[in-house]
Image (tube, rainbow, N blue to C red):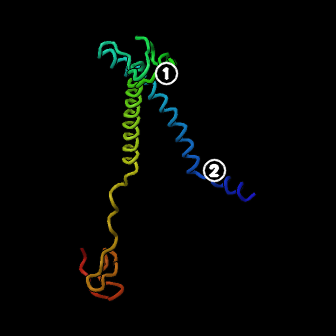
Amino acid sequence: MKIVAEFREFALKGNVMDLAVGVIIGAAFGAIVKSLVDDLIMPLVGLLLGGVDFSDRYYVLKGSVPSGTSLEEARKVAGASLLAYGHFLNNVLTFLIVAVAVFLIVKAMNRLRRKGPAPSPTTRACPECTSPIPLAARRCPQCTAAVARP
């Protein structure tokens, strides 16, 4: 029973719940970015490069695959080894977009977390004993030395 109680305490801590929410939102964000890359960016890049569809680009290392075969169909051919460089390029572009988005989010959070200017001091050091004294004090309460006002 002690293990169950410890696990319950661990699972219900704020950090674990925050992590769970972050993972769920991250997965949803990843799906959106993947769709952005696969459905919007890569078709435009392919169009600019002469109508190339990068998601189906591959190089046959071993075996024979009929030309014009999609990547999924080529993977089903017995004995064929493929380098799916188009799929790799899509994933690299997806990673770069996610990395830039995370960088911008962290940068915004850091800007929000920055504290304002430091508060002005209310005390100063006594020139004789270096104990802290109020700014308006004329004498040090510790050593009774006369102190000039700032």
At 45% from the left and 27% from the top, the residue drawn is 34
Q: Which part of the image, by quadrant, shows the C terminus?
A: bottom left
User: Which numbered tag is attached to residue 11?
Assistant: 2
Three-letter amino acid code of the residue under disc 2: Ala
| Left or right: 48, with 67 as reference point | left
Residue 85 vertical position relative to residue 12 in the rendered view, above or below: above
Crowd tier of the residue under label 2, counting other residues whose Cα lies within 10 Å: few below 14, some 14–19, many 20 or above: few
- Farthest residue toward the right? 1
Residue occupying image coordinates x 47% and y 17%: 74
| Residue 137 occupies quadrant | bottom left
The quarter of the rendered structure image containing the N terminus is bottom right
Q: Residue 79 carries which label?
A: 1
Q: In which quarter of the image is residue 121?
A: bottom left
Where is residue 149? Give x, y as percent.
25, 76
Q: How crowded is mark 1: few (under 14 residues within 10 Å), some or many (20 or more)?
A: few
Of circles 1 and 2, which is in front? 1
Q: Report whether residue 108 is seen.
A: yes
Q: Where is residue 126 in the image (x, y as percent from the top left)?
A: 29, 81
Residue in the picture at 49% in, 18% down: 72
49 and 68: which is toward the camera: 68
Give the CA separation, mark 1 to mark 2.
Answer: 48 Å
> Where is residue 125 drawn, in percent x and y?
30, 78
Q: Is mark 2 on a helix, strand or loop?
A: helix
Q: Is mark 1 on a helix, strand or loop?
A: loop
Residue 37: in sight, yes or no? Answer: no
The numbered dot on residue 118 is none
Task: Specify the amino acid type for callout 1.
Answer: Gly
Between 146 and 2, the one lying in front of the other is: 2
Q: State the image coordinates of residue 100 (x, y, percent, origin top left).
A: 36, 37
Mark 1–mark 2 CB contact (< 8 Å): no
Q: Earlier in the sequence, mark 1 or mark 2?
A: 2
